[in-house]
Amino acid sequence: MDSTFVRRTAQANKCVPMCLLLGVQHTADQSRSIAGCLVEDNKFSISVHYRNVPDEDSKKKLETIVDNALADSRHKNLVKRNGKMVWEIRPNFEWHKGSALRYILKEVFQPAEEAPLFPLYVGDDITDEDAFTEIRKLNYGIGVFVRPDDQHRATNAQYTLRSPDEVLSFLSRLSRL
């Protein structure tokens, strides 16, 4: 097993109690009064979803709760990452979808030279950009960003699709090749 992954896992394990403390004691308790908020414990990270928070004032209040929790010195090893209608609170080191993709390709699949693995990564969130960047660094594979026509932001993905229905159509056609 990759020693870098083992070291990162050990670092993440040290952060688990902090993540739980942040998620359960502070963020979850204080956000209960905010309608539509969902705090998700992902073991090595916390996701604070605000998609269903009804107004901008409530969203700002929720973000203040998250930021105040991170300002607490007990949580100095944690950072906030913006996602699609979510804040991800995670350990402050290279621990993201790009490093996960790299690990899977190197350690799990270990592609043989005669039949190389060709990664296809489809994502619709800012947190997927790390994986799109990793695919570009590898110089093989394809990154596909799913975004509606009205969402125009830069991406490291090589291609874009407009909806989950287009993803299904693309994968269906690909499976027939």
Image (cartoon, rainbow, N blue to C red):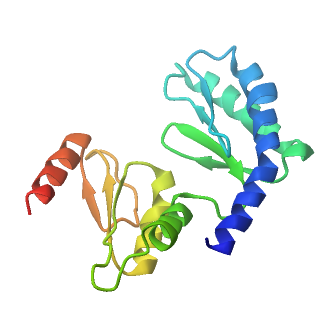
Residue at image x 14%, y 56%?
A: 175
Q: Is residue 160 left or right of residue 31?
A: left
Does 80 sit above or below residue 69? below
Depth check: 160 or 20 in front? 20
Residue at image x 65%, y 67%?
A: 5
Q: Position of residue 37 (x, y in %)?
A: 59, 23
Q: Position of residue 133 (x, y in %)?
A: 46, 69
Does 74 sit above or below residue 1? above
Q: Is residue 175 left or right of residue 66?
A: left
Give the position of the N terminus as an image quadrant: bottom right
Residue at image x 85%, y 51%?
A: 76
Does 133 sit above or below residue 121? below
Depth check: 46 or 85 in front? 46
Q: Is residue 32 left or right of residue 14?
A: left
Depth check: 108 or 162 in front? 108
Q: Position of residue 70 (x, y in %)?
A: 80, 43
Q: How many marks?
A: 0
Looking at this rendering, what residue extends furthest in the bottom direction? Answer: 113
